[in-house]
Amino acid sequence: MKKKTKMSKKNNKLQNYDVVIIGGGMVGASQAAALAHLPIQICVVDAGPGKSHWSPEVYDLRVSAITRASQNVFINTGVWQGIENRRVQPYEEMHVWDATGDGSIDFYAEDIGEPNLGHIIENSVIVGALLDVLKQHDNVNYLSHSKPTALEVSDTSVQVSLDSGQTLDAKLIIGADGARSWVREQLKIETEGWSYGQKGLVTTVKMSAEKTPGAWQRFLPSGPLAFLPVSSDEYSIVWTTAEAAADHLLTLDDAAFIAALNEALGSSEIGEVINVAQRAAFPLRLQHSKTYCKSRVVLVGDAAHTIHPLAGQGVNLGLMDVADLTQILERAHSKHQDIGVYSLLRKYERKRKGRNLLTMFSMDGFKRLFCNTDQPWVAIRNSGLSLTHKLNPLKNKIIRQAMGLTDDFPKLTKNPE
């Protein structure tokens, strides 16, 4: 494997790569790790510090519910061991119920012959494990504290200028730089979508009872309240509510906030909240790029699509982008094809766009259904939840699909054993 090009911020010469990835978060770093086994030169450009802020003493405010398909992406790229060496919480059950009625549905790993339904992992744990793996690859250069300033596309290559004065030349630029993507702006790719007028309030709480780790989600008229286990009696919560209500909850002292949270949770098997960590809130919106690619430039993750967090599918969709794009680029490289041509990148767009739109609008539909307080809709959704709970084949098919346990997923999402 070729040695990576060592780059100094004082070096203004043109640096040549095969792939430059803008954005070094969970999706961008995963994309680099997925391509690193190929005999190509890769550069990751990230505005951040190039290190994880994970601490074993406290839980990260932001966590992800990682599906089996996403877990396999991490296994196949050598990242999973680093995640396990830090901190990861599998969960065996998932319970969903409606606050305005008696409708509920429960999922159990044992019903589908799986050891768990997924894993709750702190975002900083994932990033830290990814960065460790990237350091092991001589053909990957990770530029931290770096921001792109200009993008120029030609027929045969694409160049990106950095605030350090460096210019990178590549066959392909991958934009993994989030919902406010600089890459997308440079390409003048328009987006469609809307604000939900809601915020997701996040924190970590300790409960009064210990229980087999499970995910719990109560649908309130104002939005879903999710409890995601990080231990047997501690949970990361995502409380979706109106922007003004979220802002008010942030101003409460711990005792008042705990009281409001316990009222929102209602009676449940996981007991009551007895302690709470620091809190934060972020605005929620649906956003979708009209196209995912142009010649020599392609978008992945939140740069291409953002979704309501009620089912925790955001980062999983991004990792599926990574898996499909990797498979397409691997095949092209094996055939000595140009990996940056539009016709090739369009294959990725056609593969991902339909799946992403289906998930996005399914989640949007669920959100609108469960926030509707009109009595006919309340009756319909409660009956639907209870009926689906009784239909085990349908229920198990739903959870297997959500976990990515289907034959039509890309190679990177499959168990390597």
Image (cartoon, rainbow, N blue to C red):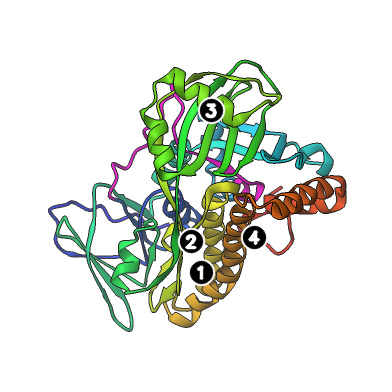
Compared with residue 3, is residue 123 higher up or lower down, i.e. above or below?
above
Does 302 lie within the magenta span? no
Which residue is identified by label 4?
411
Q: Position of residue 77 (x, y in %)?
A: 54, 49
Q: SS at mark 1? A: helix
- Please provide percent x and percent y for residue 155: 32, 84
Amino acid type at mark 3: Leu
Mark 4 residue type: Lys
Q: Which numbered marker is on residue 261?
A: 3
Which residue is nearer to you in this view: 339 or 401? 401
Q: Amino acid at mark 1?
A: Leu
Magenta segment range? 47-72
Q: Secondary structure at mark 4?
A: helix
Whether residue 130 appears in this view of the structure is: yes
Which residue is the site of mark 2? 38
Point out the tag, 3 or 1, that comes first from the N-terminus. Answer: 3
Counting residues from the N terminus, which is met first, the one under dot 2 or under dot 4?
A: 2
Q: Nearer the viewer, mark 4 or mark 3?
A: 3
Q: Which mark is in front, 3 or 2?
A: 3
User: In terms of sequence position, does the residue under pointer 3 or pointer 2 come before the other?
Assistant: 2
The answer to if 61 sits in the magenta stretch is yes
**In the rendered image, the vertical position of residue 248 relative to residue 196, given as above or below:** above
How many numbered marks, from 0 up?
Answer: 4
Label 1 sits on residue = 329
Give the mark nearest the N terminus, 1 or 4.
1
Nearer the observer, disc 1 or disc 2? 1
Left-right relation of 90 to 294: right
Q: Are marks 1 and 2 in contact (CB under 8 Å)?
A: yes
| CB atoms of marks 3 and 2 within 8 Å | no
